[in-house]
Image (tube, grey):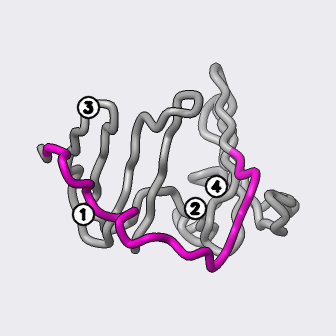
Amino acid sequence: MKECKETYNGDKLSHVFFSDSKTLYRLLPPQKKTIKSGDAFKGTELRYDWEEASSKGEEERHAKKIPNMIIAGKNCEAFQTTHKETTCIFAGWGHVLLTSEIGGSSKSLIKAVNFEENVPVPADKFQVPAGYTIQ
């Protein structure tokens, strides 16, 4: 499983987290530094997985299906979990998580605004660039 997540500060690339299907790497482009972060058994990103969320029993995890949502043009299955004072909503298409919303004393929303399939990706996207130190 090859995945790559790039984080920008304005228009400058500040952080890259990627899997080459065997190892996880964190790149810090401003410092030209790479940190090996362990084995890539699950990739870099959370998955949408109702089966996993509900496998411990709906009562224990307080997980329940909620109506589908349209996220980035995809008809996404959705579920909600509740633990103590925190409610989380997850929606995905296939196993791709396209939105997660966590509410409680603090709130967080991550939502895809665009989703493209079968896009060619250069092989070097999943390699440590030349000139980077590895820790």
Distance from Cα at disc 2 to Cα at disc 3: 38 Å
Q: For numbered disc 4, what is the local secondary structure?
A: helix
Q: Residues within 10 Å of mark 1 (few under 14, many from 20)?
A: some
Distance from Cα at disc 1 to Cα at disc 4: 36 Å
Disc 4 marks a residue whose amino acid type is Glu
Q: Which residue is mark 3?
A: 31
Q: For numbered disc 1, what is the local secondary structure?
A: strand
The structure residue drawn at horizontal position 48% and vertical position 52%, both measured from the top left corner, is 5
The magenta-colored residue range is 111-133
**Main SS, magenta residues:** loop
Q: Quadrant of the N terminus?
A: bottom left
Q: Which residue is mark 2?
A: 53
In this orientation, which residue lies closer to the viewer: 82 or 24? 24
Disc 3 marks a residue whose amino acid type is Gln
Disc 1 marks a residue whose amino acid type is Thr
Q: Which residue is mark 4?
A: 59
Q: Residues within 10 Å of mark 2 (few under 14, many from 20)?
A: some
The structure residue drawn at horizontal position 58% and vertical position 61%, both measured from the top left corner, is 53
Between circles 4 and 3, the one closer to the viewer is: 3
**Mark earlier in primary sequence (1, 4):** 1
Distance from Cα at disc 1 to Cα at disc 2: 26 Å
In this orientation, which residue lies closer to the viewer: 23 or 41? 23
Q: Look at the picture and state if 19 lies above or below 5.
A: below
Between circles 1 and 3, the one closer to the viewer is: 3
Between circles 1 and 2, the one closer to the viewer is: 1
Is residue 81 on the magenta stretch? Answer: no
